Amino acid sequence: MSIFSFFNRKPRIDRPKVIMTLLVRDEVDIIEQHLLYHAGMDIDGFIVTDNRSVDGTRDILEKYRKNGLILELIDEPSANYNQAAWVHRMIELARDKYGADYCINSDADEFWYTRNRSLRNELAASRFNRIDCPSYMMLPTSGGEFWTATDCVRRRAPKKFGLSGNNNFLFGKPTQKVIHRTQGYLMIKMGNHGVEMIDDVHEISRTIWIYHYSIRGKEQFKRKILQGGAAIEANKASSRKEASHWRYFYRGHDEGLIDLDQEYYRVIGMDKLTELRRAGCVVTDTTMKDIFSESRGFLPIHQPDL
């Protein structure tokens, strides 16, 4: 926390209205679990943008729009991937139409966790308008539901493991995602890793973090790379640094330089896991597995009021 942030802390909001924005494409294997889990963590509602889903995701979204959990469902047909602009549109809706005090801008594969099982209560205690939350990658299981995974990447893999470079999006330094107040909001940044505020008073959270299930199996990995790579390449206005791993795999596959089946096993560090655990890069974390197991697979601990 900077000196500026400490001396310019904001008044607490007793019962903040918290809305989660969600940008999705073909997430049928995880989207329902995501919605119900976060409803059980005291999210007041969702604003969702569906970008060209064809795998059944849209049917699930319509189900939760009809029962009121999804406040707004936006159809985004563009093949020109423009995440920041689409998320910005949802944040403005959350603020101006639904009276959100805080926005949590998420992807379908990100599960926001706090020990007291209430994101709203954690935010009610905050005196900051931007909260940076650590995000930890979960390695895929060899079989079974995504939430049964217990291998969690907590530290960057040293160079000696050969996992550095463009394919190191599982074993790189853990990133952060932001929760922010809507008052003073200006613009979200690519990937929801940062936000522009009129008066940026921020902290790094010690009580909220994210379990990120970016890769959930080989076929999902290949589909995500090909879809995401094509979409980001279509956006000619995007920076070359944006989604660099998508570009690397997509271009390599397109040019016949890499085999995505082989890359999958390399990316997840399959032949190095024992050493990575010994080095403290990968730790066993059963938090999400325990939550999903005790709630019968994916239902929240307490049902939301729909």
Image: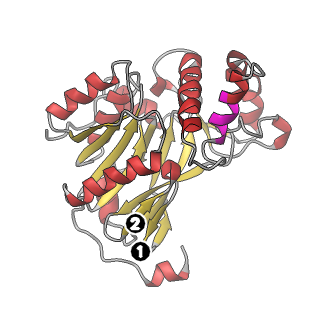
What's the coloring here?
secondary structure
User: Can the viewer see residue 54?
Assistant: yes
Where is residue 147 drawn, in percent x and y? Answer: 45, 27
Left or right of 260? Residue 210 is left
Q: Quadrant of the N terminus?
A: bottom right
Point out residue 170 in the picture as x, y percentages from the top left corner.
64, 37
| In magenta segment, residue 282 | no
Task: Say whether disc 1 or disc 2 marks the residue closer to the N-terminus.
Answer: 2
Residue 148 is left or right of residue 153, and the answer is left
Q: Which residue occupies 22% across, 49% down?
A: 44
Name the residue furthest bottom.
7
Binning the other alpha carbons within 10 Å of mark 2 as few (below 14), some (14 to 19) or many (20 upward) gives: some
The Cα–Cα distance between marks 1 and 2, rounded to whole angstroms, is: 7 Å
Secondary structure mostly seen in magenta is helix
Tag 1 and tag 2, C-beta contact below 8 Å:
yes
Q: Residue at x 33, y 66 (%)?
A: 125
What is the secondary structure assignment of the residue under circle 2? Answer: strand
Q: Which kind of residue does numbered mark 2 sit on?
A: Leu
Going by the picture, which residue comes out furthest to the right?
160
| Circle 1 crowding by C-alpha within 10 Å: few under 14, some 14–19, many from 20 | few
What residue range appears in magenta? 244-250
* SS at circle 1: loop
Q: Which residue is mark 1?
A: 198
Q: Which mark is residue 186?
A: 2
